[in-house]
Amino acid sequence: MAEQIFPIEERSGPWTEEEVLELKKYLGASKPPVIARILGRKEAEVREQIAALAKVRVDDDWTQEETAEFKRLYGTRTNKHLALIFGRSEKQVKAYADELCLAKDKAFLRKLEDRPPTRMPRWTAEEIERLRETYPIRSNLEIAQELNRSVKSVVSKAHILGLKKDRSRLQEMGRENVSLRYGRDRDASPEDDDHGAEPEGPGSTATNH
């Protein structure tokens, strides 16, 4: 497929910053031969660049931009690939995913030969009651942390139960959204990203509201 879409035009020389970002975009989603074709690089060069990424280590706190991209990619990438993409250790990736209550997509897990899909335990009556009490007024991340579930699980169950956020909570989410959009509060530690509209259904990608 890549051969049909991307013309044969091999590049050479040092990698540009744009090329490295493009490599990270496809890392874990496509195999090195396909990435090489897309980027117009030799496969050996792609593998060398991936090996170079493994040596990069970032000790700083996660930025808001990194957090947003991490949430977007986490469900469909292995922790090994995420470590390469973000310059972190697999331990850091796992710890941050746990902090954000993220979970791998079930379809993605089924594709991994050595990792069977995991099932969340059934919701108890007590958990459902707690969800009804807290969903309108608290962030999905806080609820997920309290109930020891993924954010996706919280959003999905809330949708099934027909729960909605209170108007005051939606207004607060709107203010946070504006703050992020205009780059304010960049020095603050990333919160739970309660941004965006209320999800319309189980398939919605808005999972942290």
Image: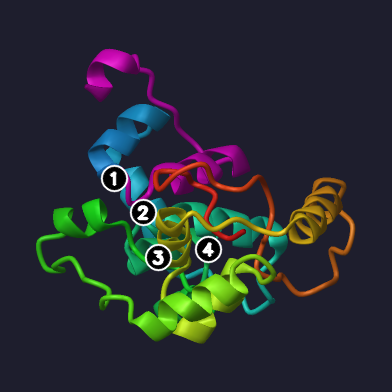
Magenta segment: does it hold 20? yes
- Between the residue at mark 4 and the residue at mark 1, the CA separation in whole angstroms equals 22 Å
Residue type (three-letter) at the residue carrying disc 1: Ala
Circle 3 crowding by C-alpha within 10 Å: few under 14, some 14–19, many from 20: some
* Pointer 1 residue: 44
Residue 153: give its label: 3
Query: Mark 4 or mark 3: which is in front?
Result: 3
- Give the amino acid type for the residue marked by disc 4 in the picture: Phe
Q: Position of residue 120 (x, y in %)?
A: 27, 74
Which badge, 4 or 3, comes first in the chain's sequence? 4
Q: Where are the magenta residues, as a range?
A: 1-29
Marks 3 and 1, how far apart at CA: 41 Å
Residue found at the very far left of the displayed protein: 113
Q: Earlier in the sequence, mark 3 or mark 2?
A: 2
Q: Secondary structure at mark 1?
A: helix
Circles 1 and 2 in contact, beta carbons < 8 Å: yes
Q: Give me the disc on residue 86.
A: 4
**Mark 3 and mark 2: Cα distance apart in space:** 39 Å
* Quarter occupied by residue 192: bottom right
